[in-house]
Amino acid sequence: MQIEPTPVNRNRDVTINIRAHQTQRDLIDRAAEALGKSRSDFMLETACREAEAVLLDRRLFILDDEKFQQFMDLLDAPPTENENLRKLLTTKAPWD
């Protein structure tokens, strides 16, 4: 699964309605104000960040045969050259 980046376009085309307790709304409002954001911006950014974390932290993936074969092909393929990684692994640590 590939997570799509949040669109730059500020025009939102769907509505999300939620009910909350007054104390929850007040807490959200204080946090949004502390970051200089609107309640909507704060809630969307926070919810999207948490949603991405949940999806990226999954340990079990259900794949059809084609996707599974693509996954296995990637695992079986030889590693690609990564010059930055090579430099990192061959550079002496400053504390050594």
Image (cartoon, helix red, strand yellow):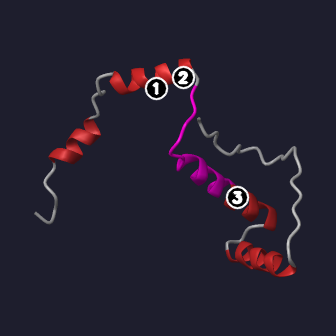
Percent position of residue 88, x then y: 23, 47
On screen, 72 above or below 5?
above
Name the residue rendered at 55%, 17% in the picture.
66
Farthest left residue in view: 96
Q: Quadrant of residue 86?
A: top left
Residue 57 is marked as none
Measured as percent of width and height from the top left, residue 61 is found at: 55, 37
Q: Residues within 10 Å of mark 1 (few under 14, many from 20)?
A: few
**Quadrant, the C terminus:** bottom left
Name the mark on residue 47.
3
Q: Residue type at mark 2?
A: Lys
Q: CA distance from mark 3 to mark 1?
A: 29 Å
Q: Quadrant of residue 63?
A: top right
Report helix, strand or loop for mark 1: helix
Q: Nearer the viewer, mark 3 or mark 1?
A: 1
Q: Residue at x 50, y 24 (%)?
A: 68
Q: Amino acid at mark 3?
A: Ala
User: Is 5 contained in the magenta span?
Assistant: no
Q: Which residues are magenta?
A: 48-63
Q: Nearer the viewer, residue 91 or 3?
A: 3
Q: Residue beneath label 2, please?
A: 67
Which residue bears the numbered disc 1? 71
Q: Secondary structure at mark 3?
A: helix
The alpha-carbon separation of the residues under discs 1 and 2 comes to 6 Å
The x and y percentages for residue 59 are 50, 45
Q: Residue at x 42, y 24 (%)?
A: 72
Kind of residue sitting beneath label 1: Phe
Alpha carbons under labels 2 and 3: distance apart: 29 Å
